[in-house]
Amino acid sequence: MRKLMVVVGTRPNFIKVTRIKAVAAERGDWQVRLVHTGQHFDERMSTVFFDQFGLVPDHWLEIPKGSPNTQMAHIMLGLEELIGKDRPDLMMVAGDVNSTLAAALTANKMGVPLAHLESGLRSRDMGMPEEINRILTDRITDIFLVTERSGKENLIREGVAEERIHFTGNTMIDTLVAFEDRIRTSPILDELGLGNGGHVLMTIHRPATVDDKEQLHQLVRLVEEVAGKHPVVFPVHPRTMGNLERFGLHDKLVSLKGVTLSGPMDYFAFQKLIATCAFVITDSGGIQEETTYRQVPCLTVRPNTERPITITEGTNELITFDLKALRAAIARIDLGTFKKGRIPHLWDGHATERVFEALERAL
């Protein structure tokens, strides 16, 4: 039986690997060890997800708080020890966070083959920390698992042999499909007094947005603009909340009528809010994909995206903090003339099965 070590560290990573152990158990030919690096140390950002998914890590590195370099160093040291003990045949990493790159480097230095889930995505914005992580991880990846055609095209353009690239579909959609019944029965609409929905869901967390005072000022103005016409639900990321308080903008946001602020939500509640909303405003990568699958309009407050299929086939549109552009997009949504989109190829709830088929072919 082959040994697979799966390394995750943040909320988006968890959502991409929820079916890994279950599918491995069904197959019976893989022993999976799940490692949580602890990059997300806030309980609301991590352990609640494990509780909901019934996905218990086999190892917790419990790295200390610190700078990205400090965290990555602790992750690499912890994984070095685990790899020495477990001796996996393969390591799998997901996405583009610091845990992803730290694990990839450790596997490479210790001679463990590496599979990268969600490889090949490119924003072409080298100012994004995630873009650096994506590119460097793919440079030392052995098995490339891609979610959309652009991933394959980018990798081939970068010199990766086509036979090493496997178009498996989107494992994050597997999670959404597998837990749809639990999502449907979430009581979050009643808890927030939202009736049958029709709200606007907002989530903003990227450093490029929330670490800059002027950008945060623009964010508050954007929320005020939207709330003048639609009820707004804004689950505030811990980083965003800290900077709102630091820059003296928290009280202004709290005072806005029609705005419901909360901390990070559990997966089922958040997905229920997506499924029942009028539209989403976000800077998140994964939410662009979830809204495309649900065919919910998504306005992404970024100048670029590493997930272009959400624009070319899905319901995503890039905007900036341009209130004129925002008003125009919202008007199209309200009039029913916003693009409808369609579900991309292989976003069907069975990507995890194809991941294991790809691993078998590659090893």
Image (cartoon, grey):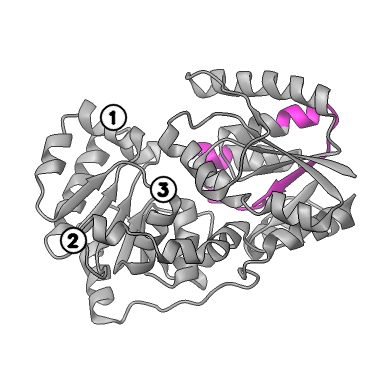
Q: Are marks 1 and 2 in contact (CB under 8 Å)?
A: no
Residue at point 47%, 61% (across, down):
182
Find out whether residue 145 is within the magenta segment.
no
x and y, in percent, of residue 76 in the image: 68, 23
Q: Earlier in the sequence, mark 1 or mark 2?
A: 2
Residue at point 47%, 28% (across, down):
41
x and y, in percent, of residue 222 in the image: 20, 52
Find numbered disc 3 in the image and state the secondary structure of the residue it sits on.
Answer: loop
Find numbered disc 1 in the image and state the secondary structure of the residue it sits on.
Answer: helix
| Rendered position, 288 above or below 236 | below
Find out whether residue 128 is within the magenta segment.
yes
Find numbered disc 2 in the image and state the secondary structure of the residue it sits on.
Answer: loop
Residue identified by numbered label 2: 231
Q: CA distance from mark 2 to mark 3?
A: 20 Å
Q: Amino acid at mark 2?
A: Pro
The magenta region covers 105-132
Residue 266 bears which disc, if any?
A: 3
Q: Quadrant of the N terminus?
A: top right
Q: Nearer the viewer, residue 158 or 107?
A: 107
Q: Nearer the viewer, residue 35 or 129?
A: 35
Q: Amino acid at mark 3?
A: Asp
Q: Give the crowd class for mark 1: few <14, some 14-19, many >=20 residues within 10 Å.
A: some
Residue 242 bears which disc, if any?
A: 1
